[in-house]
Image (tube, rainbow, N blue to C red):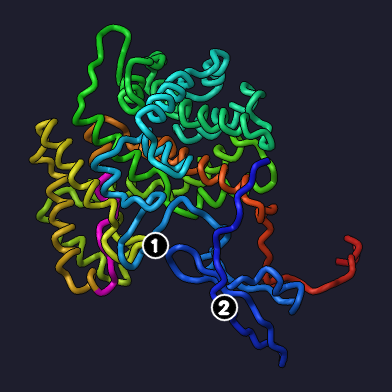
Amino acid sequence: MSVKESQAKSAGTATLTYDNKSYELPALSGTQGPNVIDIRKLYGDADIFTYDPGFTSTASCESEITYIDGDAGILRYRGYPIDQLAQHSNFLEVCYLLLYGELPSAKQASDFDHTITFHTMVHEQLTFLFRGFRRDAHPMAVMCGVVGALSAFYHDSTDINDPRQRVIATHRLIAKTPTIAAMAYKYSVGQPFVYPSNDLGYTENFMRMCFAVPCEEYKVNPVLAKALDTIFILHADHEQNASTSTVRLAGSSGANPFACIAAGIACLWGPAHGGANEAALNMLKEIGDVSRVPEYVSKAKDKNDPFRLMGFGHRVYKNYDPRAKVMRDQCYAVLEELGMHDNPLLKTALELERIALQDDYFIEKKLYPNIDFYSGITLAALGFPTTMFTALFAVARTVGWVAQWKEMVEDPQQKIGRPRQIYTGAAARDYVPVENR
């Protein structure tokens, strides 16, 4: 297995004093971002663990893929600002960048596009798997099962110790996930599956598989395709979030890549992670009209009111989400193209945004609009039901997951994930026979 060497550099030492003893801990620095204190030998030397619920102050790995500065509102893939990629690039080019570290040459881009395009079909037997699901099954439930089942169909790309098999599995996952998502959608609405078309681009092909029917020709609107392609770019990776960490943790056990990505899909399904844009859209529908915005803003400020504004603030970004402005521009373009510029949801969203950027309450708490605030409106305008929103997120994030998985497998410092705990249960006690309890 080919491996990379650590790029972290020494940044001095930190001293920990505990129980009248001092321990010297190495400090390490990356290219950018906070330095870290290396505590790998702390348990062995001092017989103590660190305590960090949610791992919010823990660097779980070394990565060269994505950089985030939440305070400054920065997101970069391999050093490239997200707004530049969204404006000038396309999703498959971004996929190549995330996987291989550099933007492709013209020939590399052409070869990569060809490879992904000719992997988009799924094994025909896989279509029978869908018949086992109820018609009203959530698309994410279907995707969890079907993506995990890919390992039962593609045995020639499950050996993680074979570099060639890792490449093939990576390409298959990027290519087939949109096909599976489109099939899940078609199954839910009772329409026949639409096979991929090799003469279309990645996003155009996905839209056709979702919205075409056999009885008439489907033409992809380039404005709508650009918006969806941009959504895919903006969601492609986001550092060590919950689902990415899940993929890495599953992969650390040696699990095959299809199982790892299925685990990531399951984690993404959680409403606190991948379901935020659906929640934001539902909130705008609940508000209903611009005239009711002040009422709901007051409710959001009331600590005793259970209402919360969705699509504002972010776990990482303490500034304006750098993806939000890009998404807002695409949202405007879609609504204008479809003649929906008077859309009440958009008007409500704009009024909420105006208040959030001017009101002291939002400014002090740094509750700026995030990407989910606009992506829900955009996806609804494109014709997707809310149940598909997270599935679309999974289509985009698959490339980030496989890039992170690939990096993890090739990391010489990688070992099986094994967090520790503070045990607060019962102390040692003897078994009592049932008749004496």
Residue 391 percent coordinates (x, y)? 42, 36
Residue at the spot of label 1: 316
Frontmost of labels 2 and 1 is: 2
Question: Which residue appears at 24% of the width and 33% of the height?
Answer: 226
- For the residues labelled 2 and 1, the Cα–Cα distance comes to 27 Å
Q: Is mark 2 on a helix, strand or loop?
A: strand
100 to 20, vertically: above or below:
above
Instruction: Name the side, left or right, on which 305 lies relative to 65.
Output: left
18 to 395, vertically: above or below:
below
Query: The disc labelled 2 sits on which kind of residue?
Result: Gly
Q: What stretch is highlighted in magenta?
A: 364-375
For residue 126, what is the image quadrant? Answer: top right
Q: Can you say which quadrant of the picture contains the N terminus?
A: top right
Residue 417 percent coordinates (x, y)? 66, 55
Count of marks overlaid on the render: 2
Query: Are the residues at dot 2 and dot 1 in contact (C-beta closer than 8 Å)?
Result: no
145 to 8, vertically: above or below:
above
| Of 279 and 370, the residue lying toward us | 370
Q: What element carries label 1?
A: loop
Instruction: Name the side, left or right, on which 155 lies relative to 325.
Output: right
Instruction: Name the side, left or right, on which 53 lies relative to 79.
Output: right
Query: The disc labelled 1 sits on which kind of residue?
Result: Val
Q: Can residue 145 be seen in this view?
A: no
Magenta-colored stretch includes residue 216: no
Question: Which residue appears at 14% of the width and 37% of the height?
Answer: 335
| Of 244 and 141, the residue lying toward us | 244
Residue at the spot of label 2: 12
198 to 299, vertically: above or below:
above
